[in-house]
Amino acid sequence: MSTSSAGGAADSAAPSPLAPPGRTSPEKNASQEKKQSKPPRSVVRTKSWITVAFLLPALVLLGALVLYPIGYSVWRSLFDVSGDEFIGLDNYTELFSDDRIRTALRNNLIWVLVAPAICTALGLIFAVLTEKVRWGTAFKMVVFMPMAISMLAAGVIFSLVYQNEPERGAANAAWTTIHDTFSDPAPWPGARPRPNGDLKGPDKGPYTSDATVSAGRTALLPLVAVKPQDAEGEQPAAEPKAGGDGVNGTVWLDFKPGGGEPDVVDSGEKALKDIKVEAVKDGKVVASATTASDGTFTLPAAADGAQLRLPASNFAEAYGGVDWLGPSLVTPAVIAAYVWMWAGFAMVLIAAGLASVPRELMEAARVDGANEWQVFRRITVPVLAPVLAVVLVTLMINVLKIFDLVYIIVPSARLEDGNVLAVELFQQAFAGTEPDLGVGSAISVVLLLLVIPVMIFNIRRLRKESGR
């Protein structure tokens, strides 16, 4: 009995002939697979208060610093100056009827279309070209350096650069140097004849004599209004000599410290050299000459019976450069300052994207006979398209709220010409003796509405990139 019982127990413990060794039954496999198919329980899901605890500070700050100001601005834009009377959309109507605000809207459109495109294009060019030179890293550092300067400091720098006086403004100093290199300045700017003298003409010339000249006779052409320091190093004027077949004359500064006789070449009076003298008959120039270092000139016999004329080119004021902050150039000038700052930002981002471009594609294209322009247009730009979109959209959002550069660089007299929405918002809501928070809030809402489409485009692009 005991033996059989033991044998029975042993037989029952033996593996079934239907189940191979090392395998479990189908029911057990199904239960194990069911257990394994269940996802692991997340700590966040099991304890939702942990999620709330982590998100609550961020949500409070987001509501206090973003959502509440947006909501209050929308609400305040529907009320009048005092904030007591509900006026509906009247503030928004004023936005499109006020010339200042319409100018600001137009300038903002110019900013959005021009500044990001130029910065992105320059960043792309710099990033591609600096890969081909040894000193590319140093160049990138120099181009990126303006990003370390605040907008306020950059505005102060460029407000000095754009000064009208060439002695103070670097832009006009360079421009006048280039201009004077290819164009000779007037020899005696500002000089003019005596009020009751023989020479007559409009202010700054040309000046023409009433009397005619005769061959063999002399002609005296006195001028005044020359700064003493300008004539300090000049030679004394010489008396013209009569005789010969032509006309001899002298142009000089008819002024002598301590006294002197008008229309007479007195001893010590200075000669005016390099002045062009023309002989005119019936409105046509028949002869011309230029004064020597002693002020004398000689016209040929063809000048007999002609009037003498001193062209306006002798007296034109010195070239003072360009009015960079004038009505027509103020917005491009400020955009140039922005490009100086942000082209380095675009270059760095594009250079980072360029580093990930497969070199095999470029080499294969070159082997197939493509030149560098074709490689750039057909390979580099398409591959960098996502990076270029990031840079372009980021800069578009940035320029929509541009304030510092415009407020610092543009003079108050030109603010209407270079105005943008952010500056106009400040002027309407906070500056002046009668701030209007209603109109200022309406401008802020319009700015928000302008930014939203760009942000939606950026979010969709990011989702598309993450889905690849």
Image (tube, rainbow, N blue to C red):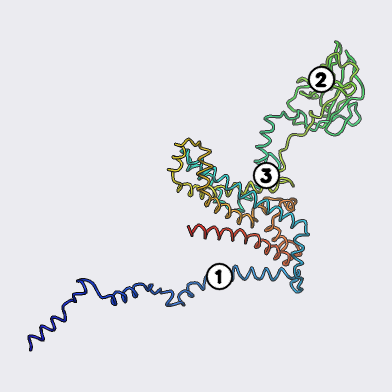
Q: Residues within 10 Å of mark 1 (few under 14, many from 20)?
A: few
Residue located beneath label 1 in the image: 61
Query: What residue sits 69% from the left and 31% below the top?
Result: 180
The kind of residue on which mark 1 rests is: Leu
Secondary structure at badge 3 equals: loop
Closer to the camera in the image, 201 or 390: 390
Quarter holding the N terminus is bottom left
Name the residue at the front extreme: 18
Question: Which amino acid, by three-letter code, is at mark 2?
Answer: Ser
Task: Compare marks 1 and 2 and give the one earlier in the sequence.
Answer: 1
Q: Residue at x 74, y 47 (%)?
A: 327
**Secondary structure at numbered mark 1:** helix
Residue 440, horizontal then vertical, whole percent:
71, 64
Residue position marked by numbered label 2 in the rendering = 288
Q: Measuring 74% from the left and 34% from the top, which residue is drawn there? A: 318
Q: CA distance from mark 3 to mark 1?
A: 41 Å
Q: Which residue is mark 3?
A: 162
Of residue 259 and residue 241, the one placed in the foreground of this image is: 241
Q: CA distance from mark 1 to mark 2?
A: 81 Å
8 left or right, relative to 19: left
The percent coordinates of residue 182 (x first, y second) are: 69, 29
Residue 137, percent from left and from top: 47, 43
Q: Camera-side residue: 89 or 195?
A: 89
Q: What amino acid is at disc 3? A: Tyr
Decide: is 217 above or below 357.
Answer: above
Q: Is residue 319 above or below residue 33?
A: above
